């Protein structure tokens, strides 16, 4: 009985060119889905409990369209998606206050707020305090005049906390202001100079 030889299929070797072509093709499909998602989001009804990734935020008076993950914090979105790096990340657990921003004129730690929860609020960061012609906010001007910080890593958080506090109490005593911004920490522990600068900012605000 004769042996019948069945020719085996020779396995095809993948070249570097094949891999690159596959990556490009996959990326094109993924990008197309992203680009055309905006036109389909409005036509689809979100399932109960789901979270849309493409949202619009009101940041410093501008409507900013941004793609965010459901677990993404506002601090991460502001810094790494919108490029607003004046909002600092220190402890990243609501202890230092470096990431303080205003939500509807109230100071909040942006490291502990999910971005999706801020979509209907007015968000103001340190970049949004100066006027369109470049004039600094009175609290910012007070910092310059009193040279209230050393390394200044915590500066934007202190300024935002003070601006928010002054909206509720525009004429505070030194002790009242110290208590009002006590949720912010300074690594250099230069609190006396910081408080002097913030009090100067409060004075300039009343004159404005």
Image: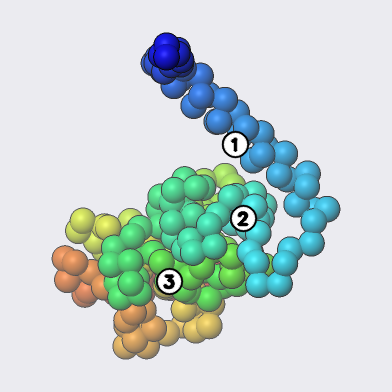
CB of mark 1 within 8 Å of CB of mark 2? no
**Image quadrant in which the C terminus is located:** bottom right
Please indicate, yes or no, whether residue 2 appears anywhere in the rendered image.
yes
- Dot 2: element: loop
Residue depicted at 78% across the width and 47% down the height: 40
The nearer-to-camera label among 3 and 2 is 2
Q: Earlier in the sequence, mark 3 or mark 2?
A: 2
* In-front residue for pair 178/87: 87
Give how far across and how far down residue 93 sits, in percent: 33, 72
Give the residue drawn at x 24%, y 61%: 149
Q: Residues within 10 Å of mark 3 (few under 14, many from 20)?
A: some
State the CA–CA distance, disc 3 to disc 2.
18 Å
Q: Going 59% across and 70% down the picture, which residue do you hit?
A: 117
Q: Find numbered disc 3 in the image and state the secondary structure of the residue it sits on.
A: helix
From the image, tell me which residue sits under label 1.
Answer: 30
Read off the residue under disc 2.
53
Give the Cα distance between marks 3 and 1. 31 Å
In percent of width and height, residue 169 lies at 49, 84
Q: Which residue is mark 3?
A: 112
Mark nearer the viewer, 1 or 2: 1
């Amino acid at each position: 009985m004769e042996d019948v030889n069945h020719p085996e299929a020779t396995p095809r070797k993948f070249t570097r060119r094949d891999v690159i072509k596959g990556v490009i093709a996959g990326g094109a499909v993924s990008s197309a889905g992203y680009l055309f998602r905006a036109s389909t989001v409005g036509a689809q009804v979100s399932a109960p409990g789901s979270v849309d990734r493409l949202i619009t935020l009101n940041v410093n008076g501008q409507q900013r369209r941004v793609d965010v993950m459901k677990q993404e914090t506002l601090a991460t979105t502001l810094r790494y998606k919108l490029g607003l790096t004046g909002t600092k990340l220190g402890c990243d657990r609501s202890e230092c206050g470096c990431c303080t921003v205003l939500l509807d004129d109230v100071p909040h730690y942006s490291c502990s707020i999910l971005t999706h929860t801020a979509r209907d609020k007015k968000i103001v960061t340190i970049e949004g305090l100066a006027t369109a012609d470049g004039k600094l906010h009175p609290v910012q001007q007070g910092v310059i005049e009193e040279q209230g910080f050393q390394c200044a890593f915590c500066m934007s958080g202190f300024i935002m906390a003070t601006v928010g506090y002054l909206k509720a109490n525009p004429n505070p005593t030194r002790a009242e202001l110290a208590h009002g911004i006590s949720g912010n920490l300074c690594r250099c522990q230069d609190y006396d100079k910081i408080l002097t600068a913030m009090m100067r900012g409060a004075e300039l605000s009343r004159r404005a």
